[in-house]
Image (tube, rainbow, N blue to C red):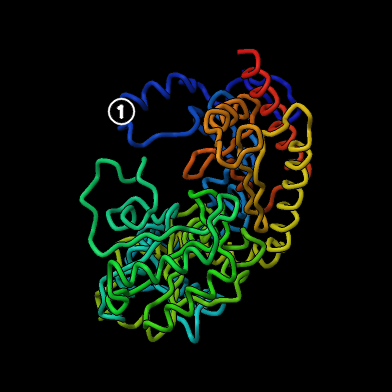
Amino acid sequence: MGTTISGEATAPIQEGPRNSTLQARKEAAVPRGLSSSLPVFAARAEGSEITDVEGKRYIDFAGGIAVLNTGHLHPRVKAAVQAQLENFSHTCVQVTPYESYVRLAERLNAIAPVRGPAKTVFLTTGAEAVENAVKIARAHTGRPGVIAFSGAFHGRTLLGMALTGKVVPYKVGFGPMPADIYHLPFPVAYHGKEVADTLEAIETLFKADIDPNRIAAIIIEPVQGEGGFYQAQPELMQGLRAICDKYGMLLIADEVQTGFARTGKMFAMEHTGVKADLVTMAKSLAGGFPLSAVSGTASIMDSPGPGGLGGTYGGSPLGCAAANAVLDVIEEEGLIERANHIGDLIVSRIRELQASNSLTGVIGDIRQVGGMVAMELVADGDADRPDPDLTRALVAKAAEKGLVLLSCGVRANVIRFLCPLTTSDALVNEGMDKLGEALRECVAERATA
């Protein structure tokens, strides 16, 4: 039986297979490489809540991996897509374009954190946006090389995973990787890696491995997503900007996970005081519909010739309709301010757990950039002793209690919080109550094992 918001038992939401049956079917029909963090099958979702096929309700602190800043099926987004469906679902913008594509490009051009007048091209996925940003950078500079960072995640395509700074599970068994990709250490003070070390490593790279005049671009997430929600310090971004300007490279900001109000700014780059040359976007751009974008300085964006950019489904009419509605919702509902409030609330609740006697030494670092929050689980408060087993157990235990959580991090010991920015305080607190209960139970069970 399932549960309603009031906790009363209900019948399954639909007649048919249960989660266990569907999981068995999935394992038989879908390759193991496509893994799911929870064996829970969604039947419907609205706002910040998901109901599974058995009628059980979950509070969603994952947001489809940062896709749902405006929540599941926001009424404005839903209405915009429904209205577009009355007209047409697809023409391919490379055949017959449509006004919503142009209007969305104009709106992003006005707010993208890039230098000078901007232009925008729309694609379908975040990885596709990254690949096209590199194509544009290479076309503009005439150079092949790209610098990325340890812990980075830039997608699962061949070039995307080459740029990604983590081998397992993203790269293992998929080589060889494209050439002229270089990785540098991402500065994380909690782990003893400082900005000066990274900037020095860049100069060492130029002396030991590649002429800087062969580098087209440096690509960086202003806040690392899969890497563990580590923020790129303003002095790092300023240093990278100076290096790019010195050597004629482009600075690419990967805002796929950080964009659209998540960090308490429309884009995370706004926290750094630095503007990029190219910005990649996806995820919450279209509130749950597949759409990505590359925005950049107009003269750079115009470097590829006609036909050099595009894709059959890129900038789909449904995605553009949804994205225009998302921008309206962010402005009208004050989601930038809301992100900061939600983040502060979550952090205050985590600090309560951190100070709890029963959880001494369990929660190490707590990180927040607006509504992008993470807590790092360690043993005995030691930053050098990550606790991935506890992290894994916590995700499972929270799900039992009706809370969807995501883990991340190079060491697999970080819990990240990506609840929709439309989530009410009451629902955030209910979710944090479930988190606290789950964490205490996990720690207690380990102590008695």
What amino acid is at disc 1? Ala
User: Is residue 233 something one can see in this rendering?
Assistant: yes
Relative to 249, say whether 408 is above or below. above
**Residue at far left of view:** 176
> Element at badge 1?
helix
Quadrant (top left/top right/bottom left/bottom right) for the C terminus: top right
Tell me what residue is drawn at x 65 percent, y 46 percent: 365
User: Is residue 107 something one can see in this rendering?
Assistant: no
> Looking at the picture, how far across and down is residue 286, in whole percent?
51, 59
Q: Residues within 10 Å of mark 1 (few under 14, many from 20)?
A: few
How many labels sit on residues? 1
**Residue at far top of view:** 449
Identify residue for label 1: 29
Relative to 384, say whether 152 is above or below. below
> Looking at the picture, how far across and down is residue 103, in whole percent?
50, 76
Task: Answer with the quarter of the image where residue 353 lies.
Answer: top right
**In front: 334, or 382?**
382
> Looking at the picture, how far across and down is residue 392, in whole percent?
53, 30
In the displayed structure, does residue 337 sit left or right of residue 321?
Answer: right
